[in-house]
Amino acid sequence: MPQFIFRLPLLCLILLPLGASPLAAADLAKGRATFRSSCASCHAVDNDSNGFGPYLKGVVGRPAASVAGYNYSAAMQQAGRNGLVWDEERLAAFLSSPSKAVPGTRMRFFGFWFSSQIEDVIAYLKANP
């Protein structure tokens, strides 16, 4: 038997992650549970109502500090004026460390510790356009 047949499974294991999207393995149910336990006390995702924080319905692809009627911090307003748009990459950085991603933000959340939590929450946010 040719040796390449035995190496095929190893090659698949090496190449599979190259074609996979970072959110491909995200778990929507875990994202919903994480959002509910860590975010929902300040943010709504299923309606256009601001709470202690701005609503996050449709946040993916939205410019920072653009929800009407919400009083954003000066730092977040400046980030919006500088062109910050909440794409997956920038949301991931913000959810990892809000104060590092937007120094001066008033958000009182220190960030998620695990990339899987971030991926799950982003998947959940994307499911609520």
Image: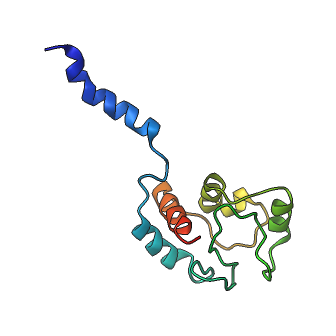
- Give above or below for 90 relative to 108: above
Number of numbered tags placed on the structure image? 0
Left or right, residue 43 beside residue 27: right
Where in the figure is residue 108, as x and y percent of width and height? 67, 74
Q: Quadrant of the N terminus?
A: top left
Q: Which residue is the extreme one toward the left?
A: 1
User: In which quarter of the view is residue 9 placed?
Assistant: top left
Where in the figure is residue 34, as x and y percent of width and height? 47, 71
Query: In percent of the image, x 70 and y 78: which residue is there?
Result: 54
- Give above or below for 16 relative to 24: above
Q: Which residue is the extreme one toward the top?
A: 2
User: In which quarter of the view is residue 71 placed?
Assistant: bottom right
Query: In percent of the image, x 50 and y 58: which residue is there?
Result: 119
Where in the figure is residue 50, as x and y percent of width and height? 69, 84
Q: Quadrant of the C terminus?
A: bottom right
**Which one is nearer the viewer's eye here, 20 or 43?**
20
Left or right, residue 56 beside residue 25: right
**Which one is nearer the viewer's eye here, 77 or 87?**
87
Where in the figure is residue 99, as x and y percent of width and height? 71, 62
Colour mapping used in the image: rainbow
Query: In percent of the image, x 38 and y 37: which residue is there?
Result: 16
Query: In percent of the image, x 49 and y 78: which residue is there?
Result: 37
User: In which quarter of the view is residue 94 placed?
Assistant: bottom right
